[in-house]
């Protein structure tokens, strides 16, 4: 679980109400910016599928039973394999090979179709879209994942992007491109599109960038999981656990 959960205030849901009220007044000039992974999508089913396939390939019966709930520490593959009954020593020994196996599959259109919605995300996204503010997905996923990403958005019943439309999906060009740099570059594109009312992201560094670059926007941090970098959240950031209230 996220080590930022302690920042979630008892009245966190009021921030979502505040943003919806702002969106209702803004119309299409107002932008609501959402990351995808660990923000509106829960990636654990994708992670679990990869571990199961690795277990099958290596004849490790415990890993073939891997489920999303075995991922209790973010994207920690070692923790997940231990939760499946593998010893700490064996988990450490197999990690390099498992990580390479994971790397070949995780960042693909086929596997990202496994994702499910973060609780309450479809309802909240549609509420924002209904009042005609613009939903803009800004993700570190690369363009080769667009087909699978859009298929997953549709399956999870989230607002669908279209070229030049009311809802858009901005993706980095290539997998090796830095997520950090791509999202910073996207800031200029967002300024051309309208006024950012709020931004939602699970990565502390990324939501901190929104907090400093868009001084009138509400920066919302999803206290789900993250890359593990030790980053202190900007004081302006509001942490929420999900979108259901």
Image (cartoon, helix red, strand yellow):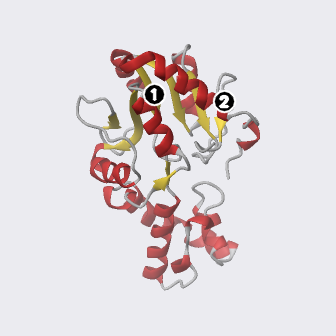
Image position of 2 with respect to 177: above or below: below
Circle 1: element type: strand
Residue at image location 40% in from the left, 45% down from the top: 158
Q: Position of residue 83 (x, y in %)?
A: 66, 71
* Mark 1 surroundings within 10 Å by alpha-carbon count, few (fewer than 14), some (14 through 19), many (20 or more): many
Residue at the spot 33% in from the left edge and 33% down from the top edge: 167
The x and y percentages for residue 104 are 38, 61
Identify the residue at horizontal 69%, vertical 72% (top origin).
88
Q: Relative to 4, is 156 on the left or the right?
A: left
- For mark 1, what is the residue? 32
Q: For marks 2 and 1, give the CA distance.
A: 16 Å
Q: Taking 98 as reference, is 126 above or below it?
A: above
Q: Nearer the viewer, residue 146 or 63?
A: 146
Local secondary structure at mark 2: helix
Q: Which mark is residue 14?
A: 2
Callout 2 touching callout 1 (CB < 8 Å)? no
Residue 110 image position (x, y, % from top left): 32, 61
Q: Is residue 209 visible?
A: no
Q: Is residue 152 visible?
A: yes
Residue 13: which quarter of the image? top right
Total marks in image: 2
Q: Nearer the viewer, residue 200 or 30?
A: 30
What is the number of the mark on residue 133?
Answer: none
At a point 38% along the width and 54% down the height, the residue shown is 107
Badge 2: residue crowd in 10 Å (few <14, some 14–19, many ≥20): few
Which comes sooner in the sequence, label 2 or label 1?
2
Direction from residue 245 to residue 136 in the image, left or right = left
**Residue 228: x, y in percent?**
62, 46
Residue 182 sits above or below residue 140 on the image: above
């Amino acid at each position: 679980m996220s080590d930022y959960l302690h920042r979630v205030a008892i009245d966190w849901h009021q921030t979502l109400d505040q943003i919806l009220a702002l969106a209702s007044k803004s119309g299409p000039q107002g932008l609501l910016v959402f990351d995808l992974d660990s923000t509106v999508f829960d990636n654990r089913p994708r992670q679990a599928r990869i571990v199961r396939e690795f277990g099958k390939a290596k004849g490790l019966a415990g890993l073939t039973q891997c489920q999303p709930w075995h991922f209790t520490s973010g994207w920690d593959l070692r923790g997940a394999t231990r939760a499946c009954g593998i010893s700490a020593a064996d988990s450490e020994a197999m990690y390099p090979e498992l990580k390479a196996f994971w790397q070949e599959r995780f960042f693909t259109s086929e596997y990202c179709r496994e994702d499910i919605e973060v609780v309450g995300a479809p309802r909240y996204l549609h509420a924002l879209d209904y009042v005609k503010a613009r939903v803009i997905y800004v993700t570190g996923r690369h363009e080769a994942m667009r087909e699978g990403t859009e298929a997953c958005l549709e399956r999870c019943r989230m607002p669908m992007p279209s070229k030049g439309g009311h809802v858009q999906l901005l993706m980095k060009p290539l997998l090796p491109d830095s997520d950090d740099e791509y999202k910073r570059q996207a800031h200029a594109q967002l300024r051309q599109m309208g006024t950012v009312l709020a931004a939602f992201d699970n990565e502390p560094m990324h939501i901190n960038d929104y907090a400093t670059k868009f001084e009138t926007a509400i920066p919302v941090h999803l206290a789900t999981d993250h890359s593990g970098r030790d980053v202190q959240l900007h004081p302006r950031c509001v942490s929420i656990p999900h979108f259901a209230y």
